[in-house]
Structure formats: C-alpha cells, structure tokens
Amino acid sequence: MRLTLRACSFRLASLLLLAVGLSRSVDLGTRGTAPCVLPSCRDYRSFQMTLMSYPYLEGAVHWVQTAPYEDVPMFTSDNTDLQPPGRSIMNHEQWRTVPVSSLSVDWSRILAVAIDEPFAEEVAEYSAEPSARECAAQRVGVSDTKKQLVSVATAVHDVAPRARLWVIFTEKEMEVMRSVDCPLDLNDATFDVVSVGNYEVHFSELREHYEWFVTKWTQQQLALVPATAFANDDNPQAVADRLEGYFEYANAMNDDGCDMDPGRVGRTGNYDGCRIWIVAGWMSVPDFPHHGGWHGLLWQGSDQFPSGAPILNVWSSELAKDRR
C-alpha cells in the first residue's frame, strides 16, 4: 500500500542514532546460527525480518523506535537524513520523479531499494478477460511505466551493484500478469525481489501468486509482506493469528536450502540464494488514518481501538528465535 504524504523533518540526537544503529548493524546473513534436526525442531527461523516505516507521517515512528522489533531497518527516500548507521532498506517513494543518482545516501549500506505498487494506478480498472482491443490498450497503458521502472532498476544496479531492487505488486497487478486472455508484462528480470501486497488475508490466499513467481521467475527472491497493523473494522488478534502462515511458508522455503544462484547481485552476505529474502511487516505506524484507518503493532490503545499488543507479541516471539 503506497503512502505519499509530504515529508516532515525530524531532529534526532546523533549519539542515539549511532548507539542504536551499531547495536543492529551485525551482518544479518551470518548472525545467530542454531543447530537443529529438521523437521522436528521449530525453535528457530530461517529468514530475516523488517518493519515498513514511514517517518514523514505525523505521529509515525522511524527506525530508532522500530530497531528492537526487526533485523533490518527501513527508511524512505523522503528522509535520507534518517538513513540508519548500519545496513538497511530504502523505500523509494519518489521513484517516478527523483533520479536514484540524486539521492544523498551511503549506497554501500543499502541492501535493497523497494518500490511499492508501481502499476497500481494503471491497472486499477483493467479487466483480466478483455476483448482484443481492450487488451491492446491495456498493454500500451503499462508500457511507459514498465520502461521507467526498468530504468530505475538499472540505475540502482549502476550506483549500487550489490543492492537489490525490490518490487511490491498489488493483487490486481498479479491478476493482470497472470491473466489467461491478456497477460500483461509487468515483472522483469531486472527486479531482484518481488512481493504481493494484500494485508487483510491469510497467506493461503496469496500462496498461489508466490508459487507462480517460484515457477516462472526462478532467479527472483521473494519478500513476504504480512500485515502488522489492523484495519479499524478488523481486530489485532485476527491479524496476529494470520502471521503464522507467513512465518511457516518462509521457514519451509528456506529450510529446503539457500542454494539458488545468487544471480545479478552476487554474494552480498545477506540471505543470498534464499528463496525468501525477507519477511516485511506492514506497517509500524501506530495510528494511520488513511485507507479506512489502521493501527500498527506499536499502537498503545485507546477508548475506541484496542492496542496492537497481540500483533506485537506474535511478531516479537518470532523475532526472538535464533536464525539459521
């Protein structure tokens, strides 16, 4: 789900930034091994975790606050001054208008650049079963965005050869990509990591999409994006209960061995060759009034809405496990 509100400035104490950042900057591809005999032992996880953060939102938190709840911090291109001291992921909010080369970041510490729902506006009204004329129009409609997105991927690869380009697709984008009558060419080999963004469903409802990526795009890694927030018409316990399916799939896929060809990025020391590159919780913002209203896992609760504690408890329990 894209968030496009205007950035607000933050002032952070430099010593706090450094102290928290150094505490989380261990090479995440090698930390925390735990001997275990499969499949009986499940007191571990075989994937890394992050929380999507949007520090420019009023009342939002940023990586200093989310650091205890993730392996890898995230920041946004709207707030490059908040780049964490260690390795991190950058969500490129302005990818259509701001060249990658103009961003003032330390690229040596960027693990990935994430782009969220790049074709959402174009495909919103598209049909999965169009007429021949409609199909031709739909393909023309996405062609310019596809060219621009590939150009951004190439720019990322040029400026940071070991950084991944991570694209998050909506379910509608998945639908038109997988259409029998008029498949649209939205994915590309220049995208290193791909995801499906739907935050109010069990993983079983998205599994077919991920299996399609596994079969058709054999060199792409996957990022699972479960909700770590509850919509105002949902409840935190239901969201917490849905998390387990994502964790189980990530463990099962990586338990088979991280033996994929590392592909374009080569050896980075960060889950190279693992089918599931990361599990990313959407989102950490405590109170997000848009899109019908949401409350994140760090929400403390109010008279009107319960706290996000059930989500935080399940997420933190998984994070506390040793990583293989």
Image (spheres, helix red, strand yellow):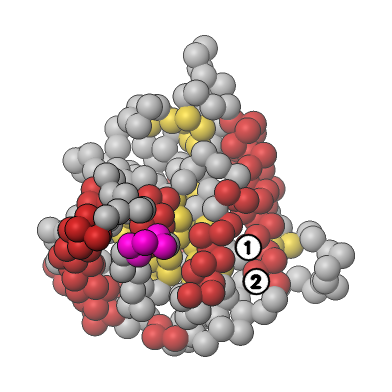
Residue placed at 49% from the left, 85% from the top?
262
**What is the number of the mark on residue 254?**
2
Q: Is residue 290 left or right of residue 270?
A: left
Question: CB under 8 Å between callouts 1 and 2?
Answer: yes
Residue 312, horizontal then vertical, whole percent: 60, 39
Task: Tell me which corner region of the image, top left, top right, bottom left or bottom right, holds residue 49.
Answer: bottom right
> Where's residue 46, x and y in %?
66, 67
- Give the Cα separation between the discs numbered 1 and 2: 6 Å
Residue 79 in picture, x, y percent from top left = 25, 52
**What residue do we see at 50% from left, 23% from top?**
233
Report the front residue among 181 and 63: 181
Residue 183, above or below 318: below
The residue type indicated by label 1 comes to Ala
The stretch in magenta equals 179-183
Location of mark 1 (residue): 250
Choose between 51 and 250: the one closer to the eye.
250
Q: Is residue 127 visible?
A: yes
